[in-house]
């Protein structure tokens, strides 16, 4: 796994706990999981384009 062994992963985990605190770890993990899921969904190659018409009510009133 990227050349990381167990001691390196433990050191990284300790540094993350010191920086962010134990209370925010679930929040950070959830955000990381959502971002990975969105990246996988975007990289699947489905071309989905969402087209929403703009409401130009102000432009139509001035014309």
Image (spheres, rainbow, N blue to C red):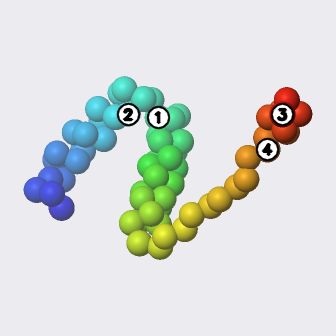
Q: Quadrant of the N terminus?
A: bottom left
25 lies left or right of 17 = right
Residue tagged 1:
22
Residue tagged 4:
55
The quarter of the picture where residue 49 lies is: bottom right
Q: Residue 8 carries which label?
A: none
Give the residue displayed 35% in from the left and 27% down from the top. Answer: 18
Dot 4 and dot 3 residues touching (CB under 8 Å): no
Q: Which of marks 4 and 3 is in front?
A: 3
4 lies left or right of 41 = left
Give the residue displayed 47% in from the left and 66% down from the top. Answer: 41
Residue 26 % position (x, y)? 52, 45
Whether residue 63 is visible? yes
Q: Is residue 52 above or below residue 46?
A: above
Dot 1 and dot 2 residues touching (CB under 8 Å): yes
Q: Residues within 10 Å of mark 3 (few under 14, many from 20)?
A: few
Q: Which mark is residue 17?
A: 2
Residue at the limit of the structure toward the top, as seen here:
19
Q: Which of marks 3 and 1 is in front?
A: 3
Tell me how far mark 1 sits from mark 2, CA to CA.
6 Å
Q: How crowded is mark 4: few (under 14 residues within 10 Å), some or many (20 or more)?
A: few
Tell me how far mark 2 sits from mark 3, CA to CA.
59 Å
Tell me how far mark 4 sits from mark 3, CA to CA.
15 Å
Q: Which of marks 4 and 2 is in front?
A: 4
Residue tagged 3:
63
Q: In this view, does 50 lie above or below 59?
A: below
């Amino acid at each position: 796994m990227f050349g990381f062994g167990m001691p390196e992963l433990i050191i990284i985990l300790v540094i993350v706990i010191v920086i962010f605190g134990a209370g925010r770890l679930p929040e950070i993990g959830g955000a990381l999981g959502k971002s990975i899921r969105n990246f996988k969904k975007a990289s699947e190659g489905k071309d989905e384009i969402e087209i929403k018409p703009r409401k130009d009510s102000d432009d139509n009133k001035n014309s």
